[in-house]
Image: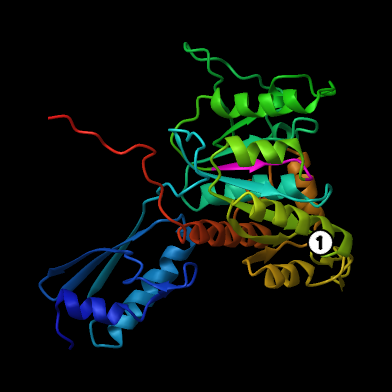
Amino acid sequence: MADLTIDNINNILTNVVDKYTEQDIVSSNSINTIEFEGDKVKITIELNYPAKGYHHELSQQITDTLAAQEINNVEVTIDTKIIKYSTQKGVAILSEVKNIIAVASGKGGVGKSTTSVNLALALQAEGAKVAILDADIYGPSQPRMLGVSKLKPDTSAEGKLLPILGHGMQSMSIGYLVDEDNPMIWRGPMVTQALEQMLRDTLWRGVDYMIIDLPPGTGDTQLTLSQKIPVSGSVIVTTPQDIALLDARKGLKMFEKVNIPILGIIENMSLHICSKCGHEEAIFGTGGGEMMATEADVNFLGALPLEIDIRTDVDEGTPTVAKNPNGRVAEIYKEIARKVSAKLTQQDRAVSAFPSITIE
């Protein structure tokens, strides 16, 4: 049996690589404690991203690596501690929201809102406290997708809006404040003001990740996002077809220009599988999102199939991750959620906007 010392255990565990951060658990400071109880080794791992679906695999990897060195009496505990990561300089933070992730597409109709709500629910399923802000003022869809379109937000004693809970997740949308059939005939300044008010005048509580579902394009809302909202990172949604990729590249370039990190690209409607015969057909082409990710040197987060249930689930107000949490599509969303949040841990941690001043 190998020596039961902390240094030796640490040395062995440098061979255990977290597949989402792509770092070994020692150099990434994921090991919280190593303790000995007789010949038993008790290891506590602390991950800075939600990954309940990965805990068993990582725990098994640790025990197998130690067993190869004849250390067999091992107990592994994995905890999660999500922290706040850096945002644009000079933008006021939200005290109750640790990280904001913007989900964008250059083009409409690529399934961005469906992806946003399922990504948010996947982060929640993996162990995070999550909120979603519907930033599409002209075409808000999150209230219906969350199954709460008939609800209206209450106000707190301080006059702040209380977020609507949908599937256990905090949410806010202009769709809660106006009738569903009422068109928003507003100019740009009114739209950007509404977005800021929804963000800062809502009483969010203990949010690890806020997903902002952006409207298509690179207009007023996106500019407001980059200048006035503390964004930790962005995700681009596209389909494989050339015309969608053309517009998605514009969205990606926009985030690069305003110095918002790009966490990766999701390819939606990647492959259609016939529900009758099982025939597979790439209706919108193949590999476009992955090729774009390679060209831009950003992460390819995953591909979602063109499947009728994904559409009908959100129409019913029960997104796929909530309706069928153990299904194949839900697992793809959860895998994407782990990749997105793990990529965020590679950024600098947020620091206080002002130094501590002590007067003696």
Check the image and report above or below for 347 versus 113.
below
**Colour option used:** rainbow
Q: Classify mark 1: helix, strand or loop.
A: helix
- Residue 264 horizontal side relative to residue 289, left or right: left
Task: Determine whether, in the image, residue 84 is placed left or right of residue 159.
Answer: left
Q: Is residue 326 visible?
A: no
Q: Nearer the viewer, residue 198 or 143?
A: 198
Q: Quadrant of residue 46?
A: bottom left
Of residue 191 and residue 48, the one placed in the foreground of this image is 191
Task: Left or right? Give the position of 254 relative to 67.
Answer: right
The percent coordinates of residue 217 (x first, y second) are: 79, 45
Which of the 4 image quarters holds residue 165?
top right
Q: Which residue is mark 1?
A: 245
Where in the figure is residue 180, as x and y percent of width and height?
Answer: 80, 24
Q: Quadrant of the C terminus?
A: top left
Give the amino acid at mark 1. Answer: Leu
Magenta segment: 210-217
Work out whether 68 lies above or below 182. Answer: below
Work out which quarter of the rendered image holds the N terminus and state it: bottom left
